[in-house]
Structure formats: C-alpha cells, structure tokens
Image (spheres, helix red, strand yellow):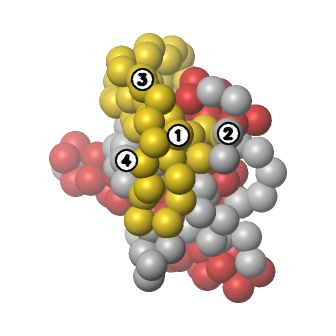
Amino acid sequence: MRGTKRIIIGILTMLIGLTVVTACGNNQSPESVAKAYISASARMDYNKMVECNDYTGDYKSPEAKKAAKALFEFTISSVPEDAKLELKSYKFKSYEKMTGEEVEEIKEIGEGKTVAVTGKEIGKVTVTYKKNGKGETLEKTENMIFIKVDGKWYKDMESLVAL
C-alpha cells in the first residue's frame, strides 16, 4: 500500500505541476521556489504549484486555468484520504544546493516552441510530514531540478518529485 500511495502522490504532484499567476516565491532563487512549491502542495493550491513550473507562460489563459483546475479536481478525487492527509502535512525543512551552473541552452517545450535557459540547479529538498496526517513527524528528501528563464527560477516541469 505504501508504494501505491507514493505513486499516487507522485502522479498527483506531476499533474498539478503540469496544470499560475503571481510569482512563485518571487522566483529569486531555487530555494524560494522550493519553499513556495512545498507550501502550495500542502495547501493543494494548484494555481501556486503551476506558477512554480510555468516558465512557458502557457497556463495563464482562462481556458488553460479551467482545464488545469478540472484535471486537479479529478486527480485529487482519486487519491486515498490518508495520502491527502499526509500531503497536507508537508512542511519545508531545508534546501541544499547539489549542483548549479550558468548555462546557455534552448529548451524545446513542444510544437516548435522554445525557451532560453540561462541557469540550472539541482537541490536536495527536505520536508517533514506526519504519516497519514497525524502522529510522529517524519522526513523525506528528494532532488528537485530548477531552471532559470528570463531571470526567474522555476521548478523544471520534467522534474517529477514524489515527496
């Protein structure tokens, strides 16, 4: 069951991440984006989670927001209640930069559309949570990938994090 719950939370996190509208942690650093993303995950605030990933700007239209919300609501309805409680108990604990570099690369984002990436960083993100939303406090650590586009940092949408 634990493996199934982890997979469901991972899929939920990915879908929410693909699903926007003020700055995610001010996009000033990968750590600020990680904090905002974890906080939004715990609140199940799909708008803020998307904003942390939306370096393409594709999810700003009313139609895209409506579709993203419908996808989020459908996905969250299939998540077991204990997994939801666990996700809602997430709290950002720490960020450790693993690797980071200035880069100049063009990232293809579909249908001939590209963005210029000028920075890339991998960070180890640690959260605390309560198993099934109650009881003893536990920790999880995962690597997240961040990219810098137009001077702002975002969680890379290709970085599936199943915290």
Residue named by callout 2: 151
Q: What residue type is labelled 3?
A: Gly
Direction right: furthest residue: 22
Q: Which residue is drawn at 36% across and 21% down?
A: 99
Measure how far apart labels 1 and 2 are at the Cα level: 8 Å
Residue mark closest to the camera, 1 vs 4: 1
Measure how far apart labels 2 and 4 are at the Cα level: 20 Å
Residue mark closest to the camera, 4 vs 3: 3
Q: Where is residue 120 in the image (x, y as percent from the top left)?
A: 44, 35
Res. 151 in view: yes
Earlier along the polypeptide chain: callout 3 or callout 1? 3
Measure how far apart labels 3 and 2 are at the Cα level: 15 Å
Q: Is residue 125 above or below residue 159?
A: above
Measure how far apart labels 1 and 4 are at the Cα level: 17 Å
Earlier along the polypeptide chain: callout 2 or callout 4? 2
Residue named by callout 1: 118
**Element class at badge 3:** strand
